[in-house]
Image: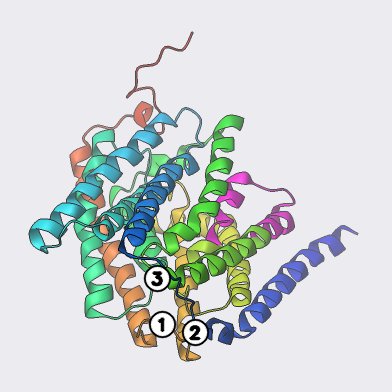
Amino acid sequence: MQMKKIALRPMVLMTLLVLALVLFAAPMAAAQSSFNTPSGFGEAGWENFMFVKNIMIWFMLMLVAFLMIFIKKFEWSVALAVLLSAAGSFIVYLAIHQFVLGTEWNQTMLLMGVICAITVVIAIGCFLGTVKMWQYLLVGLLFAPVFVLLEVVLFDVLSVSDAGGSILVHMCAAYFGLGCAIGIREKRAFKEPMHTTTHSVSFVWLAAMLLWVLWPAFVTALLPMEQVFWGMMVCYMGGIGSILSAWIVCQVIQKKVNPLIYTYAMLAGPVAIGAPLLMIGPWAALGVGLVAGAVSALSFIYLQPFLCSKIKALDVMGVHNLHGVAGWIGVAVSLIAITLGAEHAAGATVVDNLLGAVFVFVATLILGIIVGIILKITRGTFTDEEMFSDDSGFIKSEAP
């Protein structure tokens, strides 16, 4: 009886993936329908729309902090690290655009500034707890030029189609953060037991669910008004897919749900949908989400231990399992969609998107390693008591 149960698990998982591929193959042509342009949406309406988008993405950035608050006695530090890294990157991004590139202040520049900030906030998840607090500000300052470089290469040199940021945001965050972790190479991090509390993990659940709801605001942030509904619809369908497949994988492989795997993997669909956002239809998006959620959950279970042992560095929050892996899935789907002649690919070719993804992978990994080495050199003495602990950096008034 036990052998039958064991044999049944891979069969269920295989059935799930086959179903996802069938749904993906279900006509991408559904994405070819024309977008409807709303009437009466003038310049003032667009400004108000962008104003709301700016605030929503700042809200998402703050939620990322709560998505990473799960290690017992290491909660305040995560929140402060998010604020400092976001502030540093936002300031430098705006400065580069105004004083170097000559960009005039407008809502689009502010929106890209907060997207830069949320990217570095995701990236610090790879090495959270292994550097001193002031160094998160330093990371933000050093990251912004990297992000601007990627913008120029992806959209000015190449014609990459990445409306929802699978490449520019998620792959960049994963490999820059992983590069930093490799540069720091803090082996003591492997010994962290990462004990949790019920309330800290409840914060993670809340953040994941709210981020899921808000994600269409992120992927459609820079789209013209007539394309926003399509982006929202496709994003939610991708997210529904990963909600289902991540749960099934957890049940099949581990018999119970590990909330620190599920709450991340359930967001893999919205991550993967970023690159092909306008190229595929809703049923194909559901298939993409099913694949992304399953692969992300499997990456947490199997890939992370293997990868971290090879690079001799711990991806503390498992950033690569969500943002890196799902980012590559988004790239693969965009290549398939472009090959099949999808409309709304923003003039991109297969070569553009593939070269763009490879460039982001190589450039951010190398530049991340350089920044990581800088962090290690400037960190000075870093005691065991300072790692993954709020005790050394905050005033507490807890009763003994």
| Residue 197, visible in the rendered structure | no
What's the magenta region?
A: 246-268
How many tags in the picture? 3
Please tell me which residue lies in front, 66 or 261.
66
Q: Mark 3 points at which residue?
A: 163
Dot 1: element: loop
| Three-letter code for the amino acid on which mark 1 is drawn | Ala
Could you say which is closer to the camera, residue 282 or residue 71? Answer: 282
- Label ID, residue 292: none
Q: Does the magenta stretch include residue 194?
A: no
The answer to whether the residues at label 2 and label 1 have Cβ atoms under 8 Å apart is yes
Q: Decide whether residue 263 is among the magenta residues.
A: yes
Work out how far the residue at label 1 is from the one at label 3, CA to CA, in angstroms: 9 Å
Q: Which residue of the protein is positioned furthest toward the top in this rendering? A: 400
Residue nearest the observer in this picture, 344 or 14: 344
Judge from the rendering whether residue 360 lies leftward or rightward of residue 309; answer left or right: left
Q: Residues within 10 Å of mark 3 (few under 14, many from 20)?
A: many
Q: Which amino acid does label 3 sit on?
A: Ala
Check residue 337 in the rendering and tell me which mark sits there, or answer none: 2
Say above or below: 107 vs 162.
above
- Discs 2/3, front: 3
